[in-house]
Amino acid sequence: MSPYQHPQPAEQDHQIYEAGNVPLQSGRTFRKMKISYKTFGTLNAARDNMILYPTSYSARHSDIEFMVQPGAALDPGKYFIVILNLFGNGLSSSPSNTLWPDQGDRYPHVTLYDTVQVQRRMIEELWGVSKIAMVYGWSMGGMQAYHWAAVFPDFIERIAVVCGAARCAPHNKVFLDGAGSALTADPAWIDGIFTDKPVRGYRAMGRVYAGWALSQTFYREETWRQLGATSLEDYLVTFWETNFSRRDPSDLLAQFWTWSNGDISANERYHGRLDYALSAISARVLLMPGDHDLYFQVADNAAEMKHLRHATLAPIPSIWGHRAGNPVNQPDDRAFIEQHVRQLLAQ
């Protein structure tokens, strides 16, 4: 935990699972680890209508719950939906809310393998389910869905991976390194910790992120005007420079590390063999990359398809790039996603 304590908004509409002391892949033990979660709908008598919906980078349940609506694919009238807040988002265990006097400020690295291990224990202890109907996720949420299917192949019936991948690609790592370097270039970053609010770092990170999250076509056609921006500069300042300042900077870096090291085969079960990990997945897999996504590319999912048993590749036709998978302002993108997720759930 850094000396700088970024104020976190109070959110009372979620619950906490106390996981206790958790051994991590790194060899460290995460003490008093906790998962923040929110549920929608009711678990049926057969306990077979659960959908897991893990959060994406820097997002909290309140940022993504718009996809959960009566009549939508994620219908709380049909399914018991659990939104899982990812470690590092400020609600689940994160640098901003974790401090151990005997270990100083050294927040441990948490992998997505670590993440799904704790998530599964929570699911079993709280609800006693033996099968998950679907894991649905966008971006880092999609990476978690992939991990669920690979690490627990007999536990998952379906996964919907929206703008995600089984392994963080090299070009994706370059993007993450650039965004993280922009944040830590702030003068508040001293000797590996933030000593104050990184105002310039937030702004620089937002500008780097904006160039990757949307496509060239999005900018060429000035699609940002649909959001009410009056100029490109207005869009970058209003929607990007301030976007990540809602979060603690150390939390942002922690999730960057988790993202960059995401790999379903990086564990003792698969020993780095991605093809082996993919071929072990027995769940029905829906891959929905954005056809203009600059870092989770269609080609990555197409390569994965060669090793999957039951998979459908349905690229989202959208100039919104990576943001196509989080269709807050894009009814066409949402309709496309909803249609294919409904088809997956019908199988």
Image (cartoon, rainbow, N blue to C red):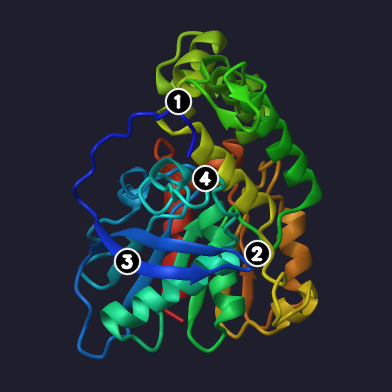
The amino acid pointed to by label 1 is: Ser
Name the residue tied to disc 4. 104
The amino acid pointed to by label 4 is: Gly
> What is the x, y in percent for residue 268?
71, 79
Residue at image coords 51%, 65%: 115
Depth-wise, is mark 1 or mark 4 nearer the camera?
4
Name the residue tied to disc 2. 26
The residue carrying pointer 2 sits among few (fewer than 14), some (14 to 19) or many (20 or more) residues within 10 Å by Cα, namely: few
Depth-wise, is mark 4 or mark 2 nearer the camera?
4
Q: Quadrant of residue 328?
A: top left
Name the residue tied to disc 1. 245
- Left or right of 285 in this view: 179: right
Query: Which one is in front, 243 or 333?
Result: 243
Residue at image coords 28%, 86%: 47
Residue at image coords 30%, 67%: 81
Depth-wise, is mark 3 or mark 1 nearer the camera?
3
Query: Which one is in front, 11 or 155?
Result: 11
